[in-house]
């Protein structure tokens, strides 16, 4: 191997058998697939496969833009693992795989036999990563876990929104997506240990654990100093002042002073350099926090006197952290997005060209290549012959036994 072009993708050679569905699980594995892992989706033919195929509003038959987002670069096969024949196929795939990956309710992995103890006799090095709502232990183990529920349960919604408004969820499914990242990280750590030791393991990952862990420093403050979080108007930071959304004459923008040097620069920009001088009631982090309401009112009055572009035009050259509050359309048109190769296109038989966001995970200088999400059961023959090692007679036998469901194609 003498050229960068000849170098394999970072995860090329890794095979993952995935019982994944909807958002959290597929979001985690799509980054692995982009990096070259062979992700084989086992889709249940009795329910039409991954429910993500039918998410409105942009879907027709079994094609949806939602499904495209989370399943590019993967393979699909329909197997009914509830049948004896389907279970045999699943185990043959496990025999020749590195990992089994799923996102199901916490009690389901054991029920359907996809934990390490239930598969190690087939493949002692198999890594079984189960992303569940509440984990595979504990009193909530059997509860279904959904992003919206967990944002409330983990305290996120109480922290979000205006002080006089209702608790508010994030506009994105951040628990699901964060859980997917955690599952991918756990799986990779497990694969490294299995390669080193020749022994696999379970990775018991949960959306609940993820959501709670992301409370980070407010949780530490509360546990050790009795801190009681509160919502602050205009999404302000709980301790750094100013660091929040401000309204200009024609819209909103964010400006933040995470270091004292930024406050010195901002004071110059707004025409009050004396506010950053020793002796000022706004001179330090602590003083600005103590006088938050007064300072915020002063800043709000100043920022309303001119446009977003004016203030950003003053703050950017001064290297003060700032930015516009974009709508989705404006965010997707930012020239930095394309400069970072974050927009990718795939060819699709129904949609023609599908444009979507790339994975932010970068390994080396080579950019990933992208293939559309698979049609249901698209890789039936490839997976059964190349991975399971079946011939046509064995496939016909298994099909007759119901391994692939009544609608096997």
Image: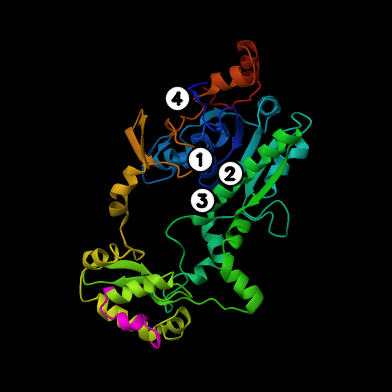
Viewer-closest of 390 and 399: 390
- Give the residue drawn at x 63%, y 42%: 187
Give the alpha-carbon distance from disc 2 to disc 1, as whole Å. Answer: 8 Å
Residue 177, numbered circle: 3
Q: Is residue 69 left or right of residue 100?
A: left
In this rendering, position of residue 123 left or right of residue 325: right
Closer to the chain start, of discs 3 and 2, is 3
Q: Nearer the viewer, mark 3 or mark 2?
A: 2
Q: Nearer the viewer, residue 377 or 347?
A: 347
Q: Find out whether the residues at labels 3 and 2 contact each other: C-beta distance under 8 Å.
A: no
Q: Give the residue drawn at x 62%, y 21%.
A: 387
Earlier-in-chain disc, 2 versus 1: 1
Can I make out residue 217 in this image? Answer: yes
Q: Which residues are the magenta region?
A: 269-282
Please tell me which residue lies in front, 8 or 108.
Answer: 8
| Label 4 to label 3: alpha-carbon separation | 32 Å
Q: Secondary structure at mark 3?
A: helix
Within 10 Å of disc 1 (Cα), the crowding (few <14, some 14-19, many 20+) is many
Marks 2 & 1, CB-CB < 8 Å contact? yes
| Residue 166 in the image, given as x and y percentages of width and height | 45, 73
- How far apart, in angstroms, are the residues tagged by discs 1 and 4? 21 Å
């Amino acid at each position: 191997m003498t050229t960068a072009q000849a170098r394999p993708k970072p995860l090329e050679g890794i095979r993952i058998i995935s019982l994944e569905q909807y958002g959290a699980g597929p979001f985690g594995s799509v980054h692995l697939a982009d990096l070259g892992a062979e992700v084989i989706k086992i889709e249940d033919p009795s329910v039409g496969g991954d429910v993500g195929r039918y998410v409105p509003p942009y879907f027709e038959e079994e094609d949806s833009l939602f499904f495209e987002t989370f399943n590019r670069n993967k393979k699909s096969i329909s197997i009914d693992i509830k049948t004896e024949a389907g279970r045999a196929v699943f185990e043959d795939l496990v025999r020749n795989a590195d990992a089994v990956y799923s996102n199901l309710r916490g009690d389901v992995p054991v029920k359907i036999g996809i934990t390490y103890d239930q598969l190690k006799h087939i493949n002692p090095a198999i890594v079984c990563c189960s992303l569940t709502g509440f984990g595979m232990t504990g009193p909530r183990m059997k509860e279904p876990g959904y992003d919206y529920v967990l944002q409330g349960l983990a305290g996120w919604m109480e922290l979000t929104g205006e002080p006089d408004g209702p608790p508010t969820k994030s506009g994105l499914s951040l628990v699901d997506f964060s859980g997917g990242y955690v599952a991918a990280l756990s799986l990779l750590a497990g694969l490294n240990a299995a390669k080193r030791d020749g022994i696999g393991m379970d990775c018991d990952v949960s959306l609940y654990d993820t959501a709670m862990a992301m409370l980070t420093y407010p949780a530490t403050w509360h546990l050790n100093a009795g801190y009681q979080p509160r919502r602050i108007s205009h999404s302000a930071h709980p301790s750094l002042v100013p660091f929040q959304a401000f309204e200009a004459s024609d819209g909103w923008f964010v400006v933040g002073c995470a270091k004292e040097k930024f406050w010195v620069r901002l004071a110059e920009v707004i025409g009050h350099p004396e506010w950053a001088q020793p002796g000022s009631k706004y001179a330090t982090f602590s003083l600005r926090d103590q006088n938050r309401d007064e300072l915020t009112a002063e800043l709000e009055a100043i920022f309303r006197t001119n446009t977003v572009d004016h203030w950003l035009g003053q703050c950017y050259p001064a290297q003060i952290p700032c930015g516009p509050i974009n709508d989705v359309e404006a965010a997707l048109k930012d020239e930095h997005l394309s400069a970072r190769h974050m927009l990718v296109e795939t060819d699709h038989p129904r949609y023609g060209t599908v444009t979507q966001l790339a994975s932010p995970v970068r390994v080396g200088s080579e950019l990933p290549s992208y293939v559309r999400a698979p049609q249901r059961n698209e890789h039936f023959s490839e997976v059964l012959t190349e991975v399971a090692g079946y011939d046509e007679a064995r496939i016909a036998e298994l099909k007759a036994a119901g391994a692939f469901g009544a609608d096997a194609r």
